[in-house]
Amino acid sequence: MKNLILLLALTIFSTVLLAQEIETLKGQEGDWGLSINISGIINDIRLENDKDANGNYMVFARKYLKDDVALRIGLNVTSDRNKWTTEDSLSLASGSRALQTVDSSKTRFDFSVLVGYEKHMAGTKRLDPYFAAELMIGRIGNTKTDATTTLKDVTGTDKTDFTRQQDGGFTMGLGLVAGFNYFIAPKFSLGAEFGFAYTYMKSGGNYSESTVNTPVSGSQTSTFILGKQEQSNNTIGISSTSGIVLSYFF
């Protein structure tokens, strides 16, 4: 009798553990989830983060508010700082040779934030379909370009400094997403998303250009230009969220 009671207790305990394992296979209230996209096919498969409307990669996460409701969060901060140098040997009109060196740099700082509401439908133990709505707001940073050109020959060095500053812009988007997670292991899923979005982008605005030339001999000269150059576009169609998604919840 004691052995029978013990066996029955172990059976009930094992059943409870199994039920708990089934219940925790998917993300649940309080869980966080991180996702990355899978792109490419066969030998070109690669993992990459989702992108915002500016083409910058975002860190994407979910926070389960309830077992069937999740908050979608995306964040991008991009600081673009590029520097490069080129050198060329030139023939001058005088017949002598000169070394031309161009030192250039370009800087821009972008950021964007995405917030969405995700509703999960009744699925199976492993299949987890959902729908979502999301809002994205982003800032395109001002662009500054500097270039210093030196032309050095036997007579000395001619130097030209060029600076251009261009206003940035902003983006905003509204999207609807349909997707699913298929849990291949507890808290670990492979799924897909299809997004349809409206995106508005405005870039550019006022700009200024200054050029200062310091010749080998003679007086320094400079020019300064102010202008305006901007563009805007509206896009309705498949968003950058579409694709195969790998997710882990914890």
Image: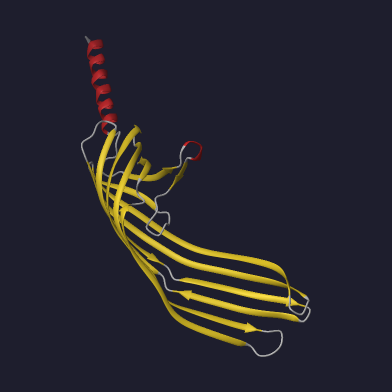
* As drawn, 239 above or below 164: above
Image-based side of 139 in relation to 92, left or right: left
**Residue 124 image position (x, y, % from top left):** 24, 31
The residue positioned farthest toward the bottom in the image shown = 219
Q: Residue at x 42, y 49 (%)?
A: 49
- Describe residue 18's horizontal placement relative to residue 95 as left or right: left
What residue is rendered at 66% in x and 79% in y?
159
Residue 180: image location, x then y, percent: 29, 39
Whether residue 205 can be seen here? no
Residue occupying image coordinates x 39% and y 72%: 230
158 or 27: which is nearer to us?
158
The answer to whether residue 82 of the structure is visible from this angle is: yes
* Residue 208 percent location from the top left of the image: 48, 79
User: In the shown orientation, is residue 141 left or right of residue 210?
Assistant: left
Which quarter of the figure is the N terminus placed in?
top left
Task: Depth check: give the residue in front, 116 or 211.
Answer: 211
The quarter of the image holding the C terminus is: top left
Vertical arrangement, residue 25 with respect to residue 135, above or below: above
